[in-house]
């Protein structure tokens, strides 16, 4: 889909729509509502960078450290460029706030975006193609599997700032209490259910996976399907591939966890992994690399372990790679400057640029850098000296795939199948078939970037 | 005698000519009208800008496909036709009707019952009234978070309490068989204090003489309620039926988002959550507006029916 192309026949602009509606709604309110037609978050002043790190919302040291990295990056840009940028704190950026701002024509000039959201923005022609702003060396430096989510053909619509793979954390105290050791760490699905059963039978917490419906649950579930060779879409993105044995097996695994009483129906301790492990409410928990910093901050002495997701018989290891990215608003006040900033901040190939990315990933956070050069630098900086970080880098990250970028209808079809099987006793084969039908029906009218 | 009231002579005003008197009255009426509009204007402006205009815009929006990035395509009635073939919309509408038919009577009866309990004067009655109304002054977000912790599986307060009684608690928010019922109970707990207050005001408006007459006539508590309290509460009942229906149909979104996110397995996806999901999660602003318009129509129809059946809350011609 060509970005910034003409509107399709019959389409009208927001301004015309509002104008026409105002005639119906009455002149009294027209003046106030037509203000929605401005094209970015602020009509004048510095370009706005919406993010959820800075200015820091609390004095928590980890939060402050992340905010300082963001501020230092923007300060350096501002010192070297005439186009000034200011950081705007925007909580829950992934959904309502951003979509509402864009719908009202007040989207930010620069913003953070997740893979779960990006396809709407790519198809809406509101993201600047960053490829012209990057050297080939820089593009080649990004890990391709992780970048794929943000790429359409040769166009790069966002630059990842981090990579966050998923794995299973486990509580060593809980294992010990249940008479289990490192040698009992499950490598297969059967072993996973067996170990979870032993833990629960010994009075320990169970195996936690998300149960709340939403993008995050899908993100966490995909690897279980991928391990058996399953996919949501065919390779060409033209049809559903969801109705497969691998899908049925993955749906059945999560269903079994709940039905056998090994997986709680509601995430314990308000979905807080640290409290759950410390209080003994959970023994194994599927989460991302970010949880390492949560433990460092809240329970640094807790004896925590991590291992790759177990695989089904004949399956291959797989995990999802999450993480946020910088994107520039093509409808903003200065898309060129916004794009240059994104490329400079995360795609510079000079020493300072590489160090900047590495510092973000291993000094302010516990993530995998999205570029090979930054990963090498992070190694030199000692970012992977701990057992947990090494396990992620060496055993988990290599089997990772970028989080899929599905439109809401496809996400919902997958979500309904997961929810039905996991929590409502749905038949996995029926749900896989129903999901595939819904996806195929949607694809008949889908127009946009390849999925 | 100085200071005595002079009743002999007519007051000066009566000497005014009839024409001048009418003009003065007219001036006064104009001034009163102006004052009335002045007092009404803040609310009128607020309602126009923040309710009437957005409502009209929303109805207009229902006839457009909105891409969420400033593009609007006129699609006629396509968004309304889509509803007919959308099983999730139909499911959420059906679920909302069940919610409505349980919750409105539930709120009505709990509010009335509590009002009857706390209307008499007894020691610490003020404290009881305050305690019953207290949940209503707390943010719904806070209410949802507290209940989320109380109802946590196995380790929550409710699960532990039932466990001591030898009862294994179900997964209140994680089992589709219980989730909607749990949301209903929490909503009644949260809202009943408000409806109690309204009923209490209605009860305190009933003249004591009516009860004295009933007592003299030898009426027992049930007869007194049936023949005095209930008829006199009809306007209050009308108000509560109308407002609780609107509140139940359009409110409680924060609680659904925090407690269940519409799950498990869509079991708490009420129509208000579905509209939110379509608009703000999927970016389907046109479709969400169409569903919202249907909600408005349903509520208008219900309100009109209620007005017609109760003759505007008076219930009888004689009243």
Image (tube, coloured by chain):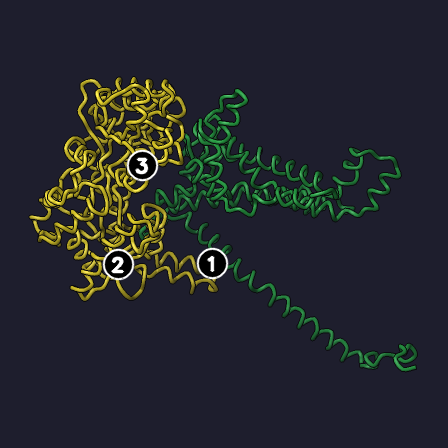
Chain colours: A yellow, B green
Marks 1 and 3: CB-CB under 8 Å?
no
Mark 1 chain: A
**Picture quadrant where residue A117 is located:** top left
Could you tell me which chain the residue with mark 3 belongs to? Answer: A
- Please tell me which residue is depicted at 42% across the width and 47% down the height of the picture: B62
Are labels 2 and 3 on one chain?
yes
Residue receiving disc 2 = A332
Inter-mark Cα distance, 1 to 3? 40 Å
Mark 1 vs mark 3: in front = 3
Q: Is the C terminus of chain A in the top left, top right, bottom left or bottom right quadrant?
A: top left
Between disc 2 and disc 3, the foreground one is 3
Q: Is residue B53 visible?
A: yes
Residue A305 is labelled as none
Which quarter of the picture shows residue B282? top left
Give coordinates of residue A172: x percent, y percent. Answer: 28, 27
Mark 1 or 3 closer to N-term?
1
Task: Give coordinates of residue A120: x percent, y percent.
Answer: 28, 45
Give x and y (percent) for residue A308.
21, 28
Proximity of marks 2 and 1: CB atoms separated by less than 8 Å: no
Expressed as whole percent of the image width and height from the top left, the position of residue A372 reads 11, 42
| Near-viewer residue (B173 or A420) | B173
**In-image side of A379 versus B296 (left or right):** left
Q: Which numbered circle lies on residue A25?
A: 1
Please report the residue visible at 37 percent of the width from the left and 56 percent of the height from the top. Answer: A17
Q: On the image, numbered disc 3 is attached to which residue?
A: A216
């Amino acid at each position: 889909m060509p970005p910034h192309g003409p509107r399709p026949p019959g389409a009208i602009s927001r301004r015309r729509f509002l104008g026409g509606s105002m005639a119906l709604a009455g002149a009294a309110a027209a003046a106030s509502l037509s203000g929605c037609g401005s094209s970015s978050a602020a009509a004048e002043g510095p370009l706005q960078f919406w993010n959820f790190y800075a200015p820091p919302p609390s004095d928590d040291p980890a939060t402050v450290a992340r905010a300082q990295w963001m501020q230092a990056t923007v300060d350096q840009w501002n010192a070297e460029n005439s186009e000034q940028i200011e950081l705007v704190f925007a909580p829950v950026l992934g959904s309502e706030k951003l979509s509402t701002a864009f719908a009202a024509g007040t989207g930010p000039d620069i913003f953070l975006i997740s893979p779960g959201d990006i396809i709407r923005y790519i198809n809406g022609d509101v993201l600047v193609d960053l490829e012209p702003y990057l050297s080939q060396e820089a593009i080649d430096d990004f890990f391709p599997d992780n970048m794929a989510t943000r790429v359409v053909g040769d166009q790069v619509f966002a630059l990842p700032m981090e990579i966050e793979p998923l794995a299973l954390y486990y509580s060593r105290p809980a294992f010990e209490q249940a008479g289990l050791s490192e040698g009992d760490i499950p490598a297969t699905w059967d072993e996973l259910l067996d170990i979870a059963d032993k833990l629960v039978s010994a009075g320990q917490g169970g195996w936690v996976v998300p149960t709340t419906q939403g993008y995050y649950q899908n993100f966490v579930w995909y690897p279980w399907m991928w391990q058996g060779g399953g996919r949501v879409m065919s390779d060409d993105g033209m049809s559903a591939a969801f109705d497969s044995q691998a899908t049925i097996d993955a749906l059945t695994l999560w269903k079994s966890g709940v039905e056998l009483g090994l997986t709680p129906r509601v995430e314990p301790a308000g979905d807080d992994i640290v409290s759950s492990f410390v209080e003994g409410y959970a023994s194994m928990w599927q989460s991302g690399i970010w949880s390492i910093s949560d433990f460092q901050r809240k329970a640094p002495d807790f004896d925590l372990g991590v291992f790759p997701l177990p695989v089904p018989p004949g399956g291959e290891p797989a995990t999802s790679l999450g993480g946020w990215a910088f994107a520039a608003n093509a409808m903003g006040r200065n898309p060129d400057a916004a794009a240059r900033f994104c490329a400079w901040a995360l795609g510079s190939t000079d020493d300072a640029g590489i160090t900047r990315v590495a510092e973000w990933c291993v000094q302010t956070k516990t993530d995998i850098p999205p570029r090979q050069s930054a990963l090498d630098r992070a190694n030199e900086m000692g970012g992977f000296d701990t057992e947990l970080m090494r396990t992620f880098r060496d055993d988990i990250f290599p089997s990772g795939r970028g989080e899929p970028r599905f439109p809401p209808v496809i996400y919902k079809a997958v979500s309904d199948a997961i929810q039905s099987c996991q929590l409502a006793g749905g038949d996995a084969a029926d749900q896989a078939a129903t999901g595939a039908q819904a996806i195929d029906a949607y694809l008949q009218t889908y127009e946009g970037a390849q999925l | 005698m100085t200071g005595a009231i002079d009743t002999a002579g007519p007051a000066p005003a009566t000497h005014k000519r009839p024409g001048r008197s009418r003009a003065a009255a007219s001036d006064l009426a104009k001034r009163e009208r102006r004052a009335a509009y002045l007092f009404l204007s803040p609310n009128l402006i607020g309602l126009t800008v923040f309710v009437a205009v957005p409502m009209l815009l929303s109805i207009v929006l229902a006839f457009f496909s909105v891409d969420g990035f400033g593009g609007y395509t006129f699609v006629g009635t396509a968004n309304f036709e889509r509803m007919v073939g959308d099983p999730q919309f139909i499911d959420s509408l059906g679920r909302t009707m069940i919610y409505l038919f349980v919750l409105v009577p539930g709120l009505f009866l709990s509010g009335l019952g509590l009002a009857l309990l706390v209307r008499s004067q007894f020691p610490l009655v003020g404290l009881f009234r305050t305690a019953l109304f207290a949940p209503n002054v707390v943010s719904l977000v806070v209410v949802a978070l507290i209940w989320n912790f109380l109802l946590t599986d196995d380790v929550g307060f409710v699960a532990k309490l039932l466990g001591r009684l030898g009862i294994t608690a179900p997964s209140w928010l994680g089992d589709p068989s219980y989730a909607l019922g749990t949301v209903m109970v929490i909503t009644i707990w949260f809202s009943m204090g408000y409806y109690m207050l309204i009923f209490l005001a209605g009860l305190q408006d009933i003249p004591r003489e009516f009860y004295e007459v009933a007592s003299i006539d030898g009426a027992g508590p049930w007869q007194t309620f049936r023949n005095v309290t209930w008829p006199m509460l009809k306007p209050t009942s009308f108000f509560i039926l109308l407002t609780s229906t609107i509140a139940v149909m359009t409110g409680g979104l924060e609680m659904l988002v925090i407690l269940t996110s519409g799950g498990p397995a869509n079991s708490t996806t009420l129509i208000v959550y579905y509209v939110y999901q379509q608009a703000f999660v999927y970016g389907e602003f046109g479709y969400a507006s169409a569903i919202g318009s249907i909600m408005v129509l349903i509520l208008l129809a219900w309100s009109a029916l209620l007005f017609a059946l109760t003759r505007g809350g008076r219930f009888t011609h004689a009243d």
